[in-house]
Image (cartoon, rainbow, N blue to C red):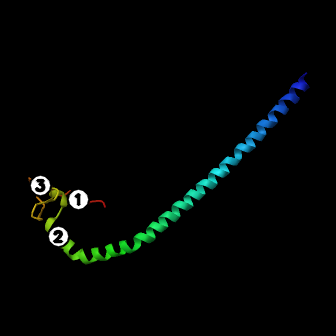
Amino acid sequence: MRVLTLVLCLALSAPAAAQQAEQADPPSDLSEGLDLLGEGARLLFRGLMAEMEPALQDMGQQLKAMEPMLRSLAEMIGDIRNYDTPEKLPNGDILIRRKPGPPPEPPEGEVEL
């Protein structure tokens, strides 16, 4: 009787082993799918960068031309946190109001950047 039980258990465990082998295959399909998705994302971003590169270079040139004006504006304004948000008037003028009260004191000691 024990031999029959042992044979029966071994016979029934064979399909379980085959099912485990079948379950091992999907992760390879999953990893292949993830690899394909990753490659597709890389191709998409390369295409976007190729399209955006001329616009980014043009923007860099324009910012370089504006650099002296922006530096003088930064010297006049100082810390931007001392001002309210800019507002545009109906005639097209832009007002940047200083916040009420004295400007905050700069922190003492070295500032970590």
Q: Secondary structure at mark 3?
A: loop
How busy is the neighbourhood of tag 2: few (under 14 within 10 Å), some, or many (20 plus)?
few
| Residue where numbered disc 2 is placed | 73
Which residue lies at the image location 45% right of the left edge and 71% below the top edge? 50
Q: Which mark is residue 109?
A: 1
Of the numbered discs 3 and 1, the one sitting upstream in the chain is: 3
- Which residue is disc 3 drawn over? 99
- Look at the numbered discs 2 and 1 and tell me whether their residues touch, using CB distance below 8 Å: no
Nearest to viewer (mark 2 / mark 1): 2
Q: Return the x and y of residue 23 as percentages of the image width and height.
A: 70, 43
Amino acid tagged 3: Lys
Dot 1 crowding, Cα within 10 Å, few <14, some 14–19, many 20+ = few
In this view, the residue in front, 109 or 86, is 86
| Residue 77 on image: x %, y % | 15, 65
Q: Is residue 65 left or right of residue 83?
A: right
Where residue 67 appears, x then y in whole percent? Answer: 24, 75
Q: Nearer the viewer, residue 47 or 24?
A: 47
User: Eyeballing the image, is 108 above or below 58?
Assistant: above
State the image coordinates of residue 48 (x, y, percent, origin top left).
Answer: 45, 66
- Tell which circle, 3 or 2, labels the residue nearer the N-terminal end: 2
Residue 8 to residue 80: above or below: above
